[in-house]
Image (spheres, rainbow, N blue to C red):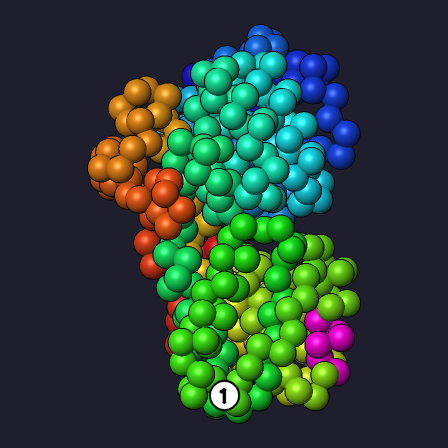
C-alpha cells in the first residue's frame, strides 16, 4: 500500500457521484482505487475546507489512517454551513464509506443525515465541535469545555487588571463548541459577581470564520471605548483580530484560542499576552483511532470502553454533560512570551 498518495481515480469517482456544489476536496489515501463505492474509506468532514485548523486536524486523522492502513478522505464545504455538510453526508451514505468523523457546524441540524448514516451501518463520531448525542456514537473532546470557558474569561479579567469591558469575537452563532465555551464564560461571571463587577462581557460578535468578516467585526470592537480585552475562541477570528489591533495601533489586548505559528508575532509584541490551544493534529489522530476501534468492533461508544489510540496511549470513553459519551484528549496548552518560541515552529 502506498502512503500519502493523492489518488486521481477515486477523485473522479467521488465527484462523478457526489457532484458537490460549493465543496472542495483534499483527498489522500493509502491505496488508489476506481471503486466508486468508497467502501473501507474513513472520511473527515471539516467545518470548512480552507480553515487551517481543520487542515491540521486532517493531518492527524490521515496519519492515524496511515498507521492502521486505512484509506482516508478530507471533505467539507467552502464556508462553515450545516446544509452543505448534510449534502456531503447524504452522498457519503450512497458511497458506502466505513466511517465519518465530523466537526459540526450545527449541533442538531445534522441529526437526520447522520442517523441515516448510522442506520446504513456507517460508524459516526464528532470531533472538536459536537453534534447532539443521538447523532453520533461518541464525541472526541479536545479539552473539558468548562475548563476552556472559565480559563478564557479568567485570563481576560487578569489581562484587564480587573477593570474594563470584555468582548467576544466568536465564529458562527450556531457553532456548538463556541456556544458551549461562551456559556461557561457567562457562568464563571455569574458565579463570581463581585470579582467580575468591573469586567463585564459587553459585546458578543460573530466573524463566521471568515477572515474579512472577522476583521470587520474586530474593527468595530477596536473603536469601542468600553472594551479593554477581546476574547477570540476561534483560530481565524484570533488572527484577524490581532492584525486589526496591530494596524489600528489599538490599546485593546487579545486572548483566545490560536495557532502558535500564526500568533507568535502578536504574543511577542504584547498584543496577545497569552492564549490557549490543544494540538489539532492530536485531535485528528485520536479521532482516527476512535473511528477505527468502532469499525473493528473493539468498542461500542459506551461509557467505560477502552482502546489503544496509537502514540496517544490507551483512552477511555466517559460520559459527557449531555448524556452522551466522549473521549477527552487532555488539557489545553497555555502559550505566552515564555514558551511561544518553542511552539511556533511546531504548529
Compare residues 62 and 16 and report the one nearer the observer. 16
Q: Is residue 221 magenta?
A: yes
Residue 342: image x %, image y %?
A: 40, 66
Residue 128: image x %, image y %?
A: 48, 47
Tell me which residue sits at (77%, 29%) in the image.
21
Horizontally, residue 134 falls left or right of residue 36, namely left
Above or below, comparing residue 221 to residue 228 in the picture: above
Q: Residue extending furthest top?
A: 35
Compare residues 281 and 202 and report the one nearer the observer. 202
Tell me which residue sits at (34%, 59%) in the image.
331
Residue behind mark 1: 197
Horizontally, residue 301 falls left or right of residue 181, namely left
> Which residues lie in the magenta part?
218-223
Q: Could you tell me which secondary element the residue under label 1 belongs to?
A: loop
Please tell me how many numbered marks the rendered image carries. Answer: 1
- The local crowd at label 1, few if under 14, some if 14 to 19, many if 20 or more residues have their Cα within 10 Å, is some
Residue 324: image x %, image y %?
A: 37, 40
Above or below, comparing residue 130 to residue 42 in the picture: below
Residue 173: image x %, image y %?
A: 65, 55
In what quadrant of the picture does the N terminus appear? Answer: top left
Compare residues 148 and 325 and report the one nearer the observer. 325
Tell me which residue sits at (52%, 25%) in the image.
115
Above or below, comparing residue 94 to residue 287 in the picture: above
Tell me which residue sits at (61%, 75%) in the image.
167
> Can the viewer see residue 111 in this picture?
yes
Q: Quadrant of residue 253?
A: bottom right
Horizontally, residue 303 falls left or right of residue 337, namely left
Magenta-drawn stretch, dominant element (helix, strand or loop): helix
> Can the viewer see residue 287 in this picture?
no
Amino acid at each position: 500500500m502506498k502512503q500519502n498518495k493523492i489518488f486521481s481515480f477515486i477523485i473522479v469517482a467521488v465527484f462523478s457521484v457526489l457532484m458537490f456544489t460549493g465543496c472542495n476536496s483534499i483527498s489522500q489515501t493509502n491505496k488508489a482505487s476506481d471503486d466508486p463505492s468508497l467502501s473501507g474509506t474513513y472520511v473527515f468532514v471539516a467545518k470548512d475546507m480552507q480553515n487551517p485548523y481543520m487542515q491540521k486536524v486532517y493531518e492527524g486523522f490521515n496519519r492515524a489512517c496511515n498507521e492502521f492502513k486505512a484509506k482516508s478522505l478530507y471533505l467539507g464545504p467552502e464556508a462553515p454551513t450545516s446544509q452543505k455538510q448534510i449534502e456531503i453526508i447524504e452522498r457519503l451514505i450512497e458511497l458506502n464509506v466505513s466511517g465519518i468523523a465530523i466537526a459540526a457546524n450545527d449541533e442538531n441540524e445534522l441529526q437526520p443525515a447522520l442517523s441515516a448514516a448510522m442506520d446504513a451501518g456507517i460508524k459516526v463520531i464528532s470531533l472538536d465541535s459536537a453534534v447532539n448525542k443521538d447523532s453520533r456514537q461518541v464525541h472526541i473532546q479536545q479539552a473539558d469545555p468548562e475548563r476552556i470557558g472559565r480559563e478564557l474569561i479568567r485570563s481576560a479579567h487578569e489581562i484587564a487588571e480587573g477593570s474594563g469591558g470584555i468582548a467576544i469575537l466568536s465564529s458562527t452563532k450556531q457553532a456548538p463548541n463556541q456556544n458551549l465555551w461562551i456559556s461557561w464564560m457567562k457562568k464563571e461571571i455569574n458565579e463570581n459577581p463581585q470579582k467580575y463587577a468591573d469586567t463585564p462581557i459587553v459585546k458578543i460578535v460573530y466573524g463566521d470564520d471568515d477572515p474579512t468578516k472577522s476583521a470587520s467585526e474586530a474593527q468595530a470592537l477596536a473603536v469601542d471605548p468600553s472594551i479593554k480585552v477581546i476574547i477570540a475562541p476561534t483560530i481565524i477570528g484570533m488572527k484577524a483580530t490581532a492584525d486589526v489591533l496591530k494596524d489600528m495601533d489599538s490599546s485593546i489586548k487579545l486572548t483566545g484560542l490560536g495557532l502558535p505559528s500564526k500568533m507568535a508575532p502578536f504574543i511577542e509584541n504584547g498584543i496577545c499576552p497569552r492564549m490557549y490551544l490543544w494540538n489539532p493534529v492530536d485531535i485528528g489522530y485520536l479521532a482516527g483511532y476512535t473511528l477505527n476501534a468502532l469499525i473493528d468492533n473493539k468498542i461500542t461508544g459506551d461509557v467505560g470502553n477502552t482502546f489503544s489510540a496509537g502514540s496517544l496511549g490507551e483512552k477511555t470513553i466517559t460520559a459527557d454533560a449531555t448524556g452522551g459519551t466522549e473521549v477527552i484528549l487532555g488539557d489545553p496548552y497555555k502559550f505566552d512570551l515564555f514558551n511561544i518560541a518553542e511552539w511556533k515552529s511546531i504548529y
